[in-house]
Image (spheres, grey):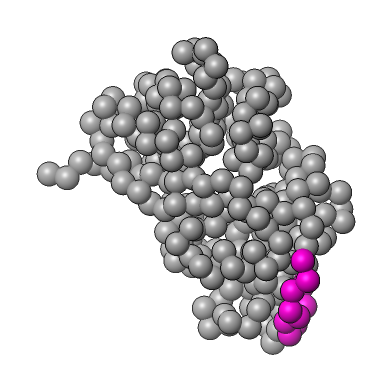
């Protein structure tokens, strides 16, 4: 097995291209993430890990940035272990790993062997894809583009969302990225007697977009706001030239899975997110 670290995003995309055939939804993490980096290059000194791994009919890829988990997608088991060995040399405090269950478990076993840490399941994830929007029941209110005046509200609600969902995203990072995303018009708000829900998206890749996050205020749920909002946003993105849309759900959340199924999203593959933790005394 041979791990190559990449400094050129386009070279990385070419090297991981064969993995697209294993699942476009998983590959979209790599592709969208790299196109986003090209559009908004990380500041000097920020750590970025782009790597591919290839051997005899074995392939893998990994992306990791700042303090987030490493994403390995549909990497083969042997490639996942090789990527773990490569990354452990420089970043033993890694938060976790996200990818197909077999590869993620293999990565975690190797990681714990190398670092002495342990791992535990954070969440099981399902990747969904949409190519056309189904008709959904109307909801009271209307969608609008979030503006700078909404930034503080969005920051507060996004912090609430990551706490509720258990996402390893520190509030400081939300404070840093939210104004930039709002300035790029990447958030939509559903208004009905005030803001009731919001949805964001990343459209950096040329032919697809990934929708995230989606959140309805706890006291405004059950009115169909999120369904109507994501349906309207999906129509907008497809009409704007996107070929496919992707999003991720928690397998254990039947409400969100049902919402997206009504809109037209179809499951493509399952992943898991494993946290690395200190072993129990």
Check if residue 215 falls in the magenta segment.
Answer: no
Q: Image quadrant for the C terminus? A: top left
Can you say whether 58 is above or below 191 in the image?
Answer: above
Indicate the position of residue 31 as horizontal and vertical percent values: 67, 35
Please name whichever residue, 143 or 139, is drawn nearer the observer in this view of the structure. 139
Indicate the position of residue 123 as horizontal and vertical percent values: 42, 53
Can you say whether 199 is above or below 237 in the image?
Answer: below
The answer to whether one can see residue 154 in this image is: no
Residue at 74% x, 40% y is 205
Indicate the position of residue 125 as horizontal and vertical percent values: 49, 52
Most distant residue in the bottom direction: 193
Indicate the position of residue 208 as horizontal and vertical percent values: 75, 45
Query: Seen in the image, is 143 located left or right of residue 85?
Result: right
The answer to whether one can see residue 142 in this image is: yes
Can you say whether 136 is above or below 278 in the image?
Answer: below
Query: Seen in the image, is 222 located left or right of residue 231?
Result: left
- Residue 232, by quadrant, is bottom right
Residue at 61% x, 33% y is 22
Which secondary structure type mostly characterizes the magenta part of the structure? loop
Segment tinted magenta in the rendering: 134-145
Query: Seen in the image, is 280 located left or right of residue 89?
Result: left
Residue at 43% x, 46% y is 273
Please name whichever residue, 74 or 92, is drawn nearer the observer in this view of the structure. 74
């Amino acid at each position: 097995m041979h791990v190559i670290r990449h400094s050129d995003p386009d070279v990385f995309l070419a090297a991981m291209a064969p993995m697209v055939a294993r699942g476009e939804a998983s590959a979209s993490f790599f592709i969208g993430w790299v196109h986003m980096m090209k559009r908004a290059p990380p500041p000097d000194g920020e750590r970025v890990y782009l790597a591919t791994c290839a051997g005899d009919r074995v392939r893998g890829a990994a992306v990791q940035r700042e303090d987030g988990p490493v994403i390995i997608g549909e990497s083969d088991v042997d490639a996942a272990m090789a990527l773990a060995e490569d990354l452990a040399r420089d970043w033993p405090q890694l938060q976790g790993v996200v990818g197909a269950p077999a590869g993620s478990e293999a990565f975690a076993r190797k990681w714990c062997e190398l670092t002495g840490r342990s791992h535990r399941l954070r969440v099981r994830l399902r990747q969904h894809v949409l190519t056309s929007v189904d008709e959904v029941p109307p909801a009271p209110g209307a969608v609008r583009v979030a503006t700078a005046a909404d930034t503080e509200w969005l920051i507060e609600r996004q912090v609430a969302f990551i706490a509720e969902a258990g996402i390893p995203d520190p509030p400081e990072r939300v404070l840093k990225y939210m104004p930039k995303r709002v300035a790029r018009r990447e958030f939509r708000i559903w208004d009905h007697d005030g803001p009731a829900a919001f949805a964001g998206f990343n459209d950096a890749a040329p032919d697809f977009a990934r929708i995230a996050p989606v959140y309805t205020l706890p006291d405004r749920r059950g009115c169909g706001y999120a369904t109507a909002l994501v349906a309207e946003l999906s129509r907008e993105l497809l009409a704007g030239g996107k070929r496919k849309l992707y999003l991720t759900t928690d397998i254990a959340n039947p409400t969100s899975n049902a919402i997206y199924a009504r809109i037209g999203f179809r499951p493509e593959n399952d992943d898991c997110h494993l946290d690395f933790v200190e072993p129990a005394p």
